[in-house]
């Protein structure tokens, strides 16, 4: 049997390897496109308590990333910000660029400090993944899952950048893990942790709202699949009073926000009903009972009315989904209202409602200006603004697909991107683990803990109109790594020692090759493609945007031009960053259409996607020509001579 000390050493080594790779990448990789945007959002919150620079994301990840900046307190254009021309809206990208490059600050230092909390969250996720997989399938499976995680190019790529993708991934996984821990041994403390985890996920990224149907489905599966001997302890009377008070507090803040009343109103209204209905003050008076029930019904119908009214803003399909969801909650509440408080089903329902009450409370109190918001009863206002932006963004659509690529901007986009961006060994182990899961003697509940979070999140992404990168389905990867670890559990139980030794040897060799290829990709993990595709040049014919070139090499290009004293240079890039070029004081200009056909003498830098297109164009001067230099994975330097 594997000794605990050996396991601990293996875990420590893997997490140290993850940390070392992450620190190297965070320091080496240049600023990506979205990091300009986020750099203008977090620091004003933690230093000036100013949320005006917050865009389409909740603030938690931005706040965590900005905390290290308090140690150096760089200058920020808080008093003279830049606005989108002819509007009263702040230009977040331009303000972020000004903060980084135009106010005398050290941009590399700022970016590195903002990336450090992301690395901390990534390491925390690795540790949670190990415990989660170990509790389900044993320590061998946990070690294999952790190995796949620590050397995953996709995790290393996005876990070392100042974006919200890894933050969502961490808290989405922790929410499911907290749910498992709660049902392993239900208690109020674990229920509170579960509610806080869900709240943290909601405050990380709007797409975390998929937890509402995910947690709901897992509650139903637990109830119908577990033996009736598993009981949920009743919530203490003191806690019930707190839940009632918090519910009323949240309802008061949600009524003024239609979106908040639609999303959280039903949970708050029925939590108030089921927790307060047996209070002596209400139970002992017929008139008070009638008033109480009337108020609850009025709140429920208000949720339905607001659901339908959202049709004007977000379309009939969105209104129909929310209306159906609220009707379902109303019907279920009506059925459960006939049950006594001592009934096990009511106890489970109360726990379920308490989760969303606590999560909604995190949203209201998660903004540091909550005192100002609360006394005006607009506590959900900060959260509903980015929610509205995201819904409008999703409705309008956003795709980054290439003509001629088999990866198209439809429902097949994300499975196809996974197939080329995930290492083949990881894909193989995930597939084997998925098949094994159906034959393992594990309960439906255990299997659902892995599959339901994957299916709901991936399904939502596939039906969404936003298709710009694998990072948008990053939250499913920890659960896929758990699947990938299952073959190790099977391997550990093989009885034939010779056969077991051979398989272990094969697996070790494959893991060494897998880890070596990941290390060879450092620090250019964004441009990683698996063995089936080959290198970044072949990948450039298939995908774009954050799957390949997100502006991470603009800094390296500027340093290259400065150090080589190239003057001037023309640049054609998919993700330009003029602020970096100007910061390094390099003489540059944008490549024109004429330059591709008949370039004047001088130096030219082509981004990898543009380079790939020119290599296919016989009319281009760059057709079939080899570059003089290559910068990073995404820039090709040519010299046109006299």
Image (cartoon, rainbow, N blue to C red):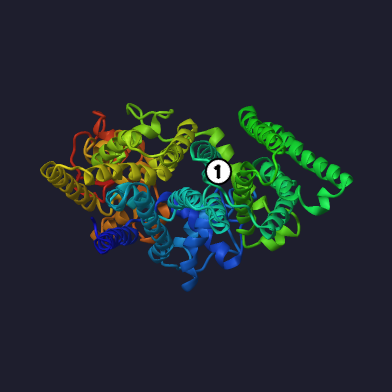
> Where is 292 relative to 557, above or below?
above
Identify the residue at image location x=51%, y=57%.
62
Q: Residue furthest bottom?
A: 71
Where the N terminus falls, by quadrant?
Answer: bottom left
Where the C terminus falls, by quadrant?
Answer: top left
> Where is 22 relative to 404, above or below?
below
Q: Which residue is mark 1?
A: 209
> Where is 266 relative to 253, above or below?
above
Q: Residues within 10 Å of mark 1 (few under 14, many from 20)?
A: some
The x and y percentages for residue 169 are 44, 49
Identify the residue at image location x=45%, y=32%.
462
Quarter of the image for residue 77 reads bottom right
- On the question of residue 23 being in view, the answer is yes
591 vs 233, left or right, is left
Quarter of the image for residue 262 reads top right
The x and y percentages for residue 121 are 42, 58
Which residue occupies the foreground of this view, 172 or 390?
172
18 vs 385, left or right, is left
Identify the residue at image location x=38%, y=41%.
470
- On the question of residue 40 being in view, the answer is no
Which residue occupies the foreground of this view, 493 or 275?
493
Which residue occupies the foreground of this view, 236 or 555?
236
Q: Label 1: state its secondary structure.
A: helix
The x and y percentages for residue 246 are 70, 55
Which residue occupies the foreground of this view, 531 or 198?
198
Identify the residue at image location x=26%, y=33%.
620
The x and y percentages for residue 217 are 53, 37
Total numbered labels placed on residues in the image: 1
Q: Residue furthest left?
A: 498
Q: Residue furthest front?
A: 229
């Amino acid at each position: 049997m594997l000794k605990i000390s050996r396991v601990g050493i293996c875990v420590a080594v893997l997490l140290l390897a993850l940390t070392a790779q992450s620190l190297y990448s965070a320091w080496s990789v240049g600023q990506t496109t979205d990091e300009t945007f986020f750099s203008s959002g977090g620091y004003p919150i933690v230093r000036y308590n100013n949320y005006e620079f917050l865009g389409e994301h909740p603030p938690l990840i931005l706040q965590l990333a900005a905390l290290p900046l308090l140690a150096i307190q760089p200058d920020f254009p808080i008093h003279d910000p830049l606005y989108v021309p002819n509007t009263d809206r702040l230009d977040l990208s331009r303000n972020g660029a000004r903060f980084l490059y135009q106010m005398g600050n050290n941009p590399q230092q700022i970016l590195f400090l903002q990336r450090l909390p992301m690395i901390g969250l990534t390491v925390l996720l690795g540790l949670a993944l190990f415990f989660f997989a170990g509790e389900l399938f044993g320590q061998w499976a946990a070690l294999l899952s952790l190995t796949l995680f620590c050397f995953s190019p996709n995790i290393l790529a996005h876990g070392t950048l100042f974006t919200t993708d890894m933050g969502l991934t961490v808290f989405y996984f922790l929410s499911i893990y907290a749910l498992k821990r709660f049902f392993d041994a239900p208690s109020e403390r674990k229920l509170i942790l579960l509610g806080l985890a869900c709240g943290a996920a909601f405050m990380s990224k709007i797409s975390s709202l998929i937890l509402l149907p995910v947690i709901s489905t897992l509650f139903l599966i637990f109830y119908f699949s577990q033996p009736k001997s598993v009981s949920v302890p009743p919530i203490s009377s003191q806690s019930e009073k707190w839940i009632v008070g918090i519910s009323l507090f949240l309802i008061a803040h949600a009524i003024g926000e239609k979106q908040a009343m639609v999303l959280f109103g039903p949970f708050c209204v029925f939590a108030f009903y089921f927790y307060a209905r047996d209070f002596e003050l209400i139970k002992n008076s017929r008139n008070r009972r009638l008033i109480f029930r009337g108020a609850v019904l009025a709140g429920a119908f208000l949720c339905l009315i607001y659901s339908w009214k959202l049709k004007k803003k977000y379309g009939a399909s969105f209104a129909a989904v929310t209306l159906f969801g609220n009707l379902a909650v109303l019907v279920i509440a009506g059925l459960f209202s006939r049950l006594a408080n001592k009934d096990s089903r009511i106890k489970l329902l109360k726990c379920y409602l308490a989760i969303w009450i606590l999560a909604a409370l995190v949203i209201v109190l998660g903004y540091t200006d909550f005192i100002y918001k609360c006394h005006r009863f607009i506590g959900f206002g900060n959260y509903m603004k980015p929610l509205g932006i995201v819904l409008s963004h999703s409705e309008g659509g956003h795709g980054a697909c290439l003509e001629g690529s088999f990866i198209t901007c439809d429902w097949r986009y994300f499975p196809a991107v996974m197939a080329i961006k995930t290492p083949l060994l990881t894909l193989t182990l995930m597939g084997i683990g998925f098949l094994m899961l159906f034959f393992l003697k594990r309960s439906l509940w255990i299997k659902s803990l892995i599959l339901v979070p994957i299916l709901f999140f991936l399904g939502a992404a596939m039906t969404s109109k936003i298709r710009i990168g694998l990072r948008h389905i990053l939250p499913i990867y920890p659960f896929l790594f758990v699947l990938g670890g299952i073959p190790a559990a099977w391997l550990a139980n093989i009885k034939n020692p010779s056969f077991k030794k051979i398989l272990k040897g094969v697996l070790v060799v494959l893991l060494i090759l897998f880890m070596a290829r990941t290390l060879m990709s450092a620090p250019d993990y964004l441009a990683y493609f698996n063995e089936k595709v080959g290198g970044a040049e072949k990948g450039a014919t298939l995908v774009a945007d954050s799957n390949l070139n997100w502006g991470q090499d603009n800094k390296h290009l500027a340093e290259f031009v400065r150090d080589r004293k190239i003057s001037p240079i023309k640049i054609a890039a998919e993700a330009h960053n003029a602020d970096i070029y100007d910061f390094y004081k390099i003489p540059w200009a944008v490549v024109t259409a004429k330059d591709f056909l008949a370039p004047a003498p001088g130096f030219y830098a082509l981004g990898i996607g543009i380079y790939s297109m020119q290599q296919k164009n016989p009319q281009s001067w760059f057709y079939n020509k080899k570059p003089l230099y290559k910068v990073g994975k995404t820039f090709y330097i040519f010299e046109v001579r006299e």
